[in-house]
Image (cartoon, grey):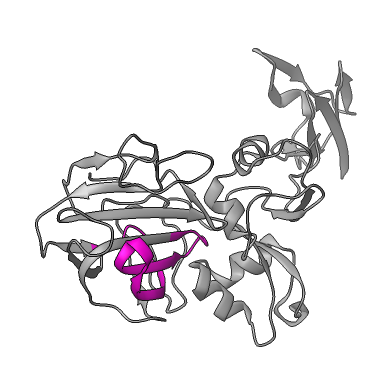
Amino acid sequence: MRQYRYVSHGLVVLIAVAISGYGAADLGLSVAARAGALSAQVPDDGGSLGNLAMGRDSVIIKPVSIPTSALPNRKAILYRVKDGDTLESISHTFGITLRELTWSNPGLRLPLKLGQPLDLPPMPGVVITVKPGDSPTSLASRYGVDPTDLLGFNSLRAEQLAPGMKLVVPVDPATGPNLPSGVAADPLYPGQLMCPIKGAPIIQKFGPTSFALEPPYGGYLHFHTGVDLLAGFGTPIVAAAGGRVTATGYADYFGMRVAITDSYGLVEIYAHMSLASTTVGQLIQQGQTLGFVGSTGLSIGAHLHLQLEVGGVPTDPGPLAGC
């Protein structure tokens, strides 16, 4: 048996001929080439036509694609902050979301400092550091992925997992991460903040304001650090995103408030409540009730003040799904 190669446009066609009891002149062979077809009659002793070579006995194997470019890098990216960088500009440059950036850098505080190291995922997902006691199964459950996918993505075997390793977890943005309990953090609007009071109108937006009741912030005489949603006293308030309750009770002009550090590392504060129905440390899913609308703290009527903090700095929560 002989084998020959036909090379065209990065494809290699392996051809081996194995005919018993037939003259090659009885065999008609057609090979697709570019937009047309190439036909050849094979002589008894083998032969060639153009780049195509054949023996007298033949089996045709389908074309095999040969990669001509390097496979995408799946390693975590270590980036050092440059002059003028912001979280938004870094996210845009590397094609990741703000949530994926903060998620990959737990404990991140603003403002950014020149030369500050940041871990960035090379594609949608999160960069994690393996801790003592972590296993492929526990990590997979925590982030809502399959253990085989987690190991395969990082080219690891289970026994190679060790504390201190940096891994990239390829979390599906359509489903988002899990809570540590293994349930989906954001089952209603993955990767988005939902309206804590469905259909409620926003009566005051984020940013500088002429409303004298608001305290000074960021060099402005009056600045509103969140968004205000109008609702009647006692209306239930639900979590805009899933996470862990990190604070409850009275605080400054917030009055009765609940703070949640969500699964991406962002903090949502729900203020001016009449009553909180959660406790510190509790795991909360998106859409779960946290408390009820009130007018405690620096407030002149029943409403909810929702504040989003990124790296400890108040940030515009942007569109709220369902408001």
**Frontmost residue, 302 versus 286:** 302
Name the residue: 37% across, 80% down. Answer: 282
Based on the picture, tell me whether residue 112 belongs to the magenta stretch.
no
Q: Is residue 125 visible?
A: no
Q: Quadrant of the C terminus?
A: top left
User: Is residue 237 among the parts visible in the rendering?
Assistant: yes
Q: Main secondary structure of the magenta part?
A: strand
Q: Is residue 16 left or right of residue 178?
A: right
Q: From the viewer's side, name the closer residue of 232 and 105.
A: 232
Rendering quarter of residue 210: top left
Residue for point 31% across, 45% down: 320
Tell me: residue 230, above or below residue 36: below
Which residues lie in the magenta part? 238-267
* Observer-nearest of 123 and 316: 316
* Residue at the (48%, 46%) spot, across then down: 217
Q: Position of residue 181 (x, y in %)?
A: 42, 79
| Direction top: furthest residue | 36
Q: Residue 132, image x and y in percent?
A: 69, 86
Picture coordinates of residue 111, whole percent (x, y): 65, 50
